[in-house]
Amino acid sequence: MTQVRVLAGTRKGAFVLTSDGKREKWSISGPHFGGWEVYHLKGSPVDLNRIWASVSTGWFGQVIQRSDDGGLTWDPVGNDFSYASDPGQHIWYDGTPRPFEFKRIWHLEPSGSDADLVYAGAEDAALYRSADGGTSWTELTGLRTHPSATTWPPGAGGLCLHTLILQGPRIIAAISSAGAFRSDDSGETWKPINRGLVSGEIPDNDSEVGHCVHHIEAHPTRPDTLFMQKHWDVCRSDDAGENWTEVSGNLPSDFGFPIAVHPHEPETIYVVPITSDSLHYPPDGRLRVYRSRSGGGEWEPLTAGLPQENCYVNVFRDAMAVDTLDEAGIYFGTTGGQVYVGTDSGDTWSPIARDLPAVLSIEVQVLP
Amino acid sequence: MSEIRVVLPAHLKNLAKVNGEVLLNVPGLLCQRTLLDALEERFPMLRGTIRDRATGRRRAFIRFYACEQDLSNELPDAPLPQDVAAAITAGKDPFMVVGAMAGG
């Protein structure tokens, strides 16, 4: 029988939510790693019972945990995220140079072809690769040592590499607040892909780097089409990031963090508008997911089942995901600890958890 | 060589999958570095959680206590104070790794 497994990373641990294919009744296990921040956990597409978790605290630093039984039990694996070359420098908030310094792993991206291969995006921005199931990590230095890296400033959340999209030898990465980058040689060399982005918060509004990209997603069948939620603006590219076009259209606010693509409709995308960069809650206190069936430009609010008054939660960049069932489920988690699912492509929403710690990430697995 | 009792904070006990105190043999000079080296040798998953991976220095919110003394700012290679070393090698007092009060 089909089973759906939702992996929720929160401020105070990880939770695994499971249901059958109807997605009506859910059981919740956790907290795993109670008290630790779990920025992200994600399962291998090759071995569905293999799940990696990025677990950290200010007290004890970074740990990577791995489960080989679908989240029932966990074992720590390697956590040596040393730089493979001189750390170099980026720009600090006060404009002075500052050495790159490892702080945490924001995002884990397992390979789609090798269960032992996984990538990790770090703060300060650096990319790591493990080919032995997470036991050891090697930095792919080409990104951190890109010539523009000396000009990268941290965003409010830090200089974090938060988005990784694996497309064979091509890798798409996004860094706050440096922008989007692409490698066509498995992460050895990188180029900025920010042409067409316009950011009013930086002196040169259409600079090659310096844009605060919040998240990027791509549909597996259309690797050249990328959808981006930027600090402000929702954008798309149809040439693997060479050129971007704003598609914010009629959104009530084009500020936000996550963006998702429907699993069966590559031009159907989802965002959660947030009021502004200083007001991290939904406009008018109404939690609305917006859906575009035209790849952006024209958007419709999805409100059924979501609180439409006095709602002041946020939805973080990695906290939205989709399942792959015929009747697609769209999922997101909030800083208020709710996890919602819309099992009809988002027409109506139901909470599957209400009182978790603030949700940092959501991933979904469908088990046959 | 006597066994030294080491008390870990709850989160690190969970990470190391141990209950109660840890007993360690610390060869040679007894100082913070040799004690923590021995701890990490036995529990590799603790590497990076007490001392920063890059600098080797005590993480900011970690403290070391023994015999009602705060040893956190002792030099890593300095021999532990004589009374402390005597007490912990005799098993009278544990060496405590503590998660500092933080958060307000």
Image (cartoon, rainbow, N blue to C red):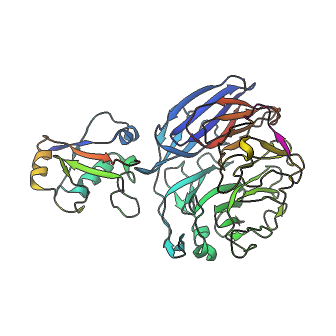
Question: Was residue A304 drawn as part of the magenta stretch in this picture?
Answer: yes
Front residue of this view, candidates A251 and A35: A251
Q: Is residue A98 above or below residue A305?
A: below
Front residue of this view, candidates A243 and A334: A334
- The count of marks equals 0
Front residue of this view, candidates A209 and A110: A209
Q: Is residue A310 above or below residue A125?
A: above
Measuring from the top left, give residue B68's x and y in whole percent: 17, 46
Quadrant including the C terminus of chain A: top right
> Residue visible at 51% across and 76% down?
A97
- Does residue A37 show up? yes
Front residue of this view, candidates A158 and A322: A158
Question: Was residue A246 drawn as part of the magenta stretch in this picture?
Answer: no
Residue A125 occupies quadrant = bottom right
> Residue visible at 85% across and 60% down?
A238
Measuring from the top left, give residue A360's x and y in whole percent: 60, 45
Magenta: main secondary structure equals: loop
Q: Locate residue A160 relative to residue A269 in the image: left or right.
A: left
Q: Is residue A131 above or below residue B90?
A: below
Measuring from the top left, give residue A274's x and y in whole percent: 71, 50
- Does residue A146 show up? no
Quadrant including the N terminus of chain A: top right
Residue B80 occupies quadrant = bottom left
Measuring from the top left, give residue A164's x and y in whole percent: 66, 56
Q: Which residues are magenta?
A: A300-307
